[in-house]
Amino acid sequence: MNLRASVFIATSLDRFIARTDGKLDWLDAANATVPEGEDCGYHAFFESIDFLIMGRKTYEQVLSFGKWPYGTKPVIVLSRNKIAIPEQLAQTVSDSSESPKDLCERLSKVGAKRLYIDGGITIQRFLAEGMINDLTITVIPVILGSGIPLFGNLKKDITLKHLATKTYDFGFVQLSYEVVKD
């Protein structure tokens, strides 16, 4: 399978991706300090992907933003249950209950080369099945104390190879890693 599954995400210094209730106010406040035109490489990353895979909770959070931020990029929402997809998104958003491995195999067969994996539980599931190839984690200079963690319990260690560290004058630190496959 010639497919890469990539993570591109921001965390607090204590590795939370959202508050316990899912709110991202801390991230909005941090983004207000970012100079105009700077996106920490997100646009280039987003242009490099074929599909965005996210969990149901992340999908519902994104829907609450009002404007759909992903344009016509195909999005697959992982959920055990059928989800409601607004009519205006029906051409680009679908749902699936497939395992990460089965989904990657299916998307590889239709020519996908790179997937963007988003959402805490979804990232954890892909990691647990050995389906993540690389991670870009932007650390925001705030300590939340509690929240939704990026990483959960694992059955075995996941070894990473450091690719790059980039620091930004406004305090963000971006870490890039490749997952070392067994």
Image (cartoon, grey):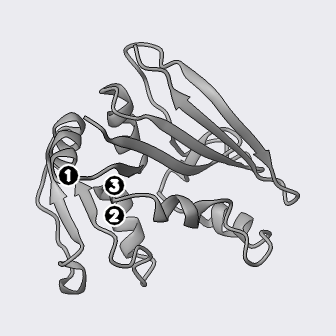
Q: Quadrant of residue 32?
A: bottom right
Q: Which residue is mark 1?
A: 79
Q: Residue furthest right?
A: 169
Q: Tell me the mark number nearer the camera, choosing from 2 and 3.
A: 3
Q: Which residue is mark 2?
A: 59
Q: How many marks?
A: 3
Q: Give left or right: position of 107 versus 159.
A: left
- Disc 2 marks a residue whose amino acid type is Tyr
Q: Secondary structure at mark 2?
A: helix
For marks 1 and 2, the one nearer the N-term is 2
Checking the image for residue 54, the label placed there is 3
Residue lying at 16% horizontally and 64% vertically, measured from the top left: 83
Q: CA distance from mark 1 to mark 2?
A: 10 Å
- The answer to whether the residues at label 1 and label 3 have Cβ atoms under 8 Å apart is no
In the rendered image, the vertical position of residue 174 relative to residue 132, given as above or below = below
- The answer to whether the residues at label 2 and label 3 have Cβ atoms under 8 Å apart is yes
Residue 67 x/y as whole percent: 43, 84
- Disc 3 marks a residue whose amino acid type is Met
Q: Tell me the mark number nearer the camera, choosing from 1 and 3.
A: 3
In the rendered image, the vertical position of residue 109 relative to residue 179, given as above or below = below
Residue nearest the observer in this picture, 120 or 39 = 39
Residue 41 x/y as whole percent: 64, 60
Q: Secondary structure at mark 1?
A: loop
In the rendered image, the vertical position of residue 118 relative to residue 178, given as above or below = below
Q: Residue furthest left?
A: 82
Residue lying at 47% horizontally and 14% vertically, measured from the top left: 157
Quadrant into which the C terminus falls: top left
Q: CA distance from mark 2 to mark 3?
A: 7 Å
- The answer to whether the residues at label 1 and label 2 have Cβ atoms under 8 Å apart is yes
Residue lying at 25% horizontally and 59% vertically, measured from the top left: 76
Q: Give left or right: position of 26 versus 9.
A: right
